[in-house]
Image (spheres, rainbow, N blue to C red):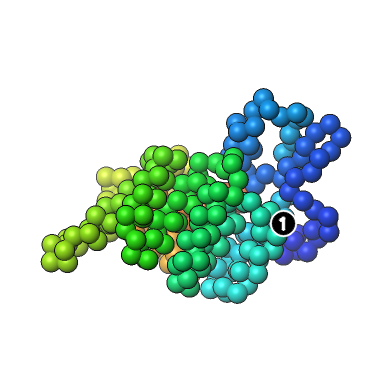
Amino acid sequence: MLEASASEMPADWKPCRDAEGSTQIAFWNREEFLAHAKHHGAHLKKPVYWVPGSYSKSWYLLALMATEEERFEDAFDCLTIGLELEPDHPELWCELGYLLGQIEEHEDALQCYEKATSAREWAPALYMGRALRGQGAQLIDLGRLDEAEAAFRRSLEFEPDSENARSELEYIEELRLPPESREERVPWFLHSAVNPPKDPLTIRLRSLVKSLPAIPGPKTIGPENYERILQAFMARGWEGFEEEFDRIVPRHRPDYEEVKRDLLREPLFKL
């Protein structure tokens, strides 16, 4: 469906268009719309309308799918097209950074995450938080721990409740210790009981599925997707689960709640 949609893109499509007496912008989500309104505020000379149908987002979603299937060249091609359409979109730069990090091109990945933080002035806090955490992760791989710490701390200014950022800061402190004094890191999934999920939908669905029969995660979302979510959960607890699940099953999908409900019937997530 996404490929069909992308193939029907008008040759002159742009994410922002001036119409008679107004500006029409194909925002990706509500957070973008609100960030734009807050940044520009009373300085707007004419009303801004949110119009549906972002083709740059379609190419972004195609890139996500290609990355999940480790079709990295296809993912790169999709992101290249997306950036040609909307070169200032932070999520496109973040995904390109993630892709380059996957193939261990950490310097190039870092530059993409840096671009994501400066691409536009009105990026939502969640975009800035992700971009800065991406910078921190690449800086750790590059051995630049002081800069990595600064990036994660700055990310907390945008998303103060990020357990991912806090766990990475703890990891940096452990890396600074002499090898003989380092303690083995406890996987975050072991702390899920004392650090329960914060997403209201997840909380409600976990309560709902307690009495339902278990379903193995791979049967719900496929072995590869399940492995990615499981790894994120084990490394970063429920925040990792939510972030990776939303990458695989975007919140705008009509069956988002149904898929999440069934996945939460996996025994590990019902604990």
Q: Is residue 39 visible?
A: yes
The percent position of residue 24, horizontal first and vertical second, equals: 77, 40
Q: Nearer the viewer, residue 171 or 107?
A: 107
Residue found farthest to the left:
180
Q: Nearer the viewer, residue 194 or 67?
A: 67
- From the viewer's perspective, is residue 48 above or below residue 197? above
Q: Quadrant of residue 32?
A: top right
The percent position of residue 65, horizontal first and vertical second, equals: 59, 65
Q: Which residue is mark 1?
A: 85
Q: Quadrant of residue 180?
A: bottom left
| Neighbourhood count class around disc 1 (C-alpha, 10 Å): few under 14, some 14–19, many 20 upward | some
Q: Is residue 220 visible?
A: no
- From the viewer's perspective, is residue 48 above or below residue 112? above
On the rendered structure, is 244 left or right of 74? left
Residue found farthest to the top:
42
The percent position of residue 22, horizontal first and vertical second, equals: 80, 33
Q: Nearer the viewer, residue 219 or 6?
A: 6
On the rendered structure, is 51 left or right of 224? right
Picture quarter with the N terminus: bottom right
Residue under the image location 60 percent in, 57 percent down: 92
Q: Nearer the viewer, residue 174 or 163?
A: 174
Look at label 1 and name its amino acid.
Leu
Say which element carries label 1.
helix
Residue under the image location 78 percent in, 64 percent down: 7
Residue under the image location 18 percent in, 60 percent down: 177
The percent position of residue 257, horizontal first and vertical second, equals: 54, 48
